[in-house]
Image (tube, rainbow, N blue to C red):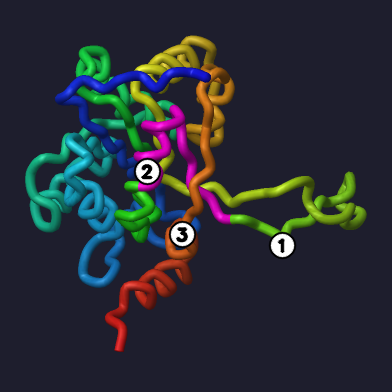
Amino acid sequence: MEATPQRPAAATAAAVVLAGGSGTRVGAGRNKVYLPLRGRPVLAWSLATFTAMAEIGVVVLVVRDADRESAEQVLAEHVGTGVEVVTGGATRQESELAGLRRLAPRIEDGGIDVVLLHDAARPLAGRSLVAAVLAAARASGGAVPGLWRDDLAAAAPGGAGLAGSGPGALVAVQTPQGFRAAPLLAAYEEAARCGFTGTDTASCMQRFAPELPIRWVPGEERNFKITYAHDLVVAEHALAPSG
């Protein structure tokens, strides 16, 4: 059995929040993470979750260059100080790497032991889910939250029909996804050298750090991604005061 690496006494976790999307499918003329949600921009909800957790010592926000001013405004009005802002790349993979490179000196000196990567378009991820992913990543090496899916079917070639239920136990993958920091950074640097672009953090780790176990953590129904206009409506209702 692989021994769990010992953390330096001062080691902490870091969160990289990705805010480089657009508002195309949501029907907005700007990046959807700056749209209002219960009095705060969508982005502010994720940042508030991570910055309020003592387990997370560093939060890095990755933004498009065109959104830099908007991001700074969100931080000033809704979050406060302590969030580091970097400019991302043309793809999610490049943006994740930009966030990891910001953390690289602290990863290399052992100050950061685990990194959580989260999509800012998932504003309702709860602290309990974040804590569960962090704990699993520290224990196993990697952790990905997801929901069981039993409503999927395999399509026949050419769309001629359905070929039965989907193979095996399937989960709908969410974020944050957490991994031990050193192998995560090394995998992303190797992916950059190879020109590899994955679908999410886990796909890159499976390709370039296959020896690192990735554990499934039960996700949350409310941790959905804001993709279309009606998703904002659903999120509004989810955040409405009960009673």
The amino acid type found where label 1 is placed reads Asp
Please identify the quarter of the rendering in which residue 89 is found: top left
Q: CA distance from mark 1 to mark 3?
A: 17 Å
| Quadrant housing the C terminus | bottom left
Residue nearer the viewer, 219 or 153? 219
Classify mark 2: residues with Cα within 10 Å, few (<14), some (14-19) or many (20+).
many
Task: Please give left or right for residue 163 compared with residue 167 in the image.
Answer: right
Whichever of callouts 1 and 3 sits on the residue coming sooner in the sequence is 1
Q: Which residue is disc 1 drawn over?
A: 151
Residue drawn 30% across the image and 59% down it? 42
Q: Is residue 232 a member of the stretch shown in magenta?
A: no
Q: CA distance from mark 1 to mark 2?
A: 26 Å
The amino acid type found where label 2 is placed reads His
In the rendered view, tell whether residue 227 sits above or below residue 80.
below
Which mark, residue 98?
A: none
Q: Which region is colored magenta?
A: 132-147
Task: Please give left or right for residue 126 compared with residue 223 in the image.
Answer: left
Res. 234 in view = yes
Q: Which residue is disc 3 drawn over?
A: 220
The amino acid type found where label 3 is placed reads Glu
Q: Secondary structure at mark 1?
A: loop
Q: Secondary structure at mark 2?
A: strand
Q: Is residue 140 a member of the stretch shown in magenta?
A: yes
Which mark, residue 118?
A: 2
Whichever of callouts 1 and 2 sits on the residue coming sooner in the sequence is 2
Tags 1 and 2 touching, CB below 8 Å: no
Residue drawn 49% across the image and 47% down it? 217
Q: Residue 126's x, y, as percent?
A: 34, 58
